[in-house]
Image (tube, rainbow, N blue to C red):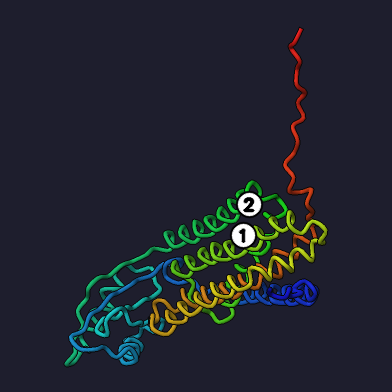
Amino acid sequence: MLRTINFMGVRNVAFGVTVLLTVLALFSWFHKGLNYGLDFTGGTLIELTYEKPADVTLVRSELVKAGYHEAIVQSFGATTDLLVRMPGEDPQLGHQVAEALQKVGGDNPASVKRVEFVGPQVGEELRDQGGLGMLMALVGIMIYLAFRFQWKFGVGAIVSLIHDVIVTVGILAYFQVTFDLTVLAAVLAIIGYSLNDTIVVFDRVRENFRVLRKASLIENINVSTTQTLLRTMATSISTLLAIAALMIFGGDNLWGFSLALFIGVLAGTYSSIYIANVVLIWLNLNSEDLIPPAATGKEVDDRP
């Protein structure tokens, strides 16, 4: 039998770590701000293909010489394909950059596969809709948990999820990782992953209220978390290994996406133990909270 681990014995220390991480993340978020990509700020995207493998460093230096100092050059799929991103509101900017690269191509000329322009108004609309989508996801989760379990479980899950999002976005802001639609998708995926981890623990806590009738809430949480620990570790480690492979082999286009997921999985595993459960203790969850309300109506006796 697995020995019960006293997770909640260090909950005050964990609370201090949680507050410190959250404050630092919020400071980084508001002080440095997010490094929004072209999806949100507007700009031009150019996809180029070369006859031979392209040298990203050389292409970047050629763009700087041509006066395009803010250009971002990334490998895209095959070694012969490059993606150039540039801020700016001129719809013709993409064609100008493409022409400049074609002139300096030498023995490895570039051909343009596509040029896309995203206006700043479209980028602002995407940013607003992304934030609204995240907010609606959190509200929907709380409503679901309130009906599926009990409202105290819903509060614990939402506090845990908010912590995960703040820490993830704060670290991205500190390192000025480009925040585009792929990173936003990663943040939304983090919400789903962390919620799944939290629900597993919550479900065991609820079951153990029936099994461990004389145990206190803290004892219940320690037992429940210990019982689900192997499952949590197996899921988290396997997920982190897959994300690490994306970070190493996915290239520049998937770097921000995979980094956000990596941070979020770590934060989600931590918060499902030391934030969601601690909120249940603060709200003084007890077995009576899980008893369905009795019917209040009185039966009418129609017998004569």
Residue closest to the eye, 119 or 24? 24
Percent from the top left, x then y, of residue 187? 52, 67
**Which numbered circle lies on residue 145?**
2
Q: As shown in the figure, which amino acid type bears the numbered disc 1?
A: Ile
Earlier in the chain: of badge 1 and badge 2, it is 2
Give the residue displayed 34% in from the left and 88% down from the top: 60
**Residue 198 higher or lower than 80, as above or below:** above
Percent from the top left, x then y, of residue 195? 59, 61
Percent from the top left, x then y, of residue 95? 25, 74
Q: Secondary structure at mark 2?
A: helix
Which residue is label 1 attached to?
199
Give the residue displayed 34% in from the left and 91% down from the top: 57
Q: Residues within 10 Å of mark 2 (few under 14, many from 20)?
A: many
Does any portion of residue 89 appear in the rendered image? yes
State the separation of the CA atoms marked 1 and 2. 9 Å
Q: As shown in the figure, which amino acid type bears the numbered disc 2?
A: Leu
Residue closest to the eye, 154 or 300? 300
In the picture provided, is 164 more to the left or to the right than 123?
A: right
Residues at marks 1 and 2 touching, judged by CB atoms closer than 8 Å:
yes
Give the residue displayed 59% in from the left and 56% down from the top: 138
Residue closest to the eye, 59 or 87? 59
**Residue 159 higher or lower than 94, as above or below:** above
Q: Kindly give the residue lying farthest to the top in the view shown.
A: 304
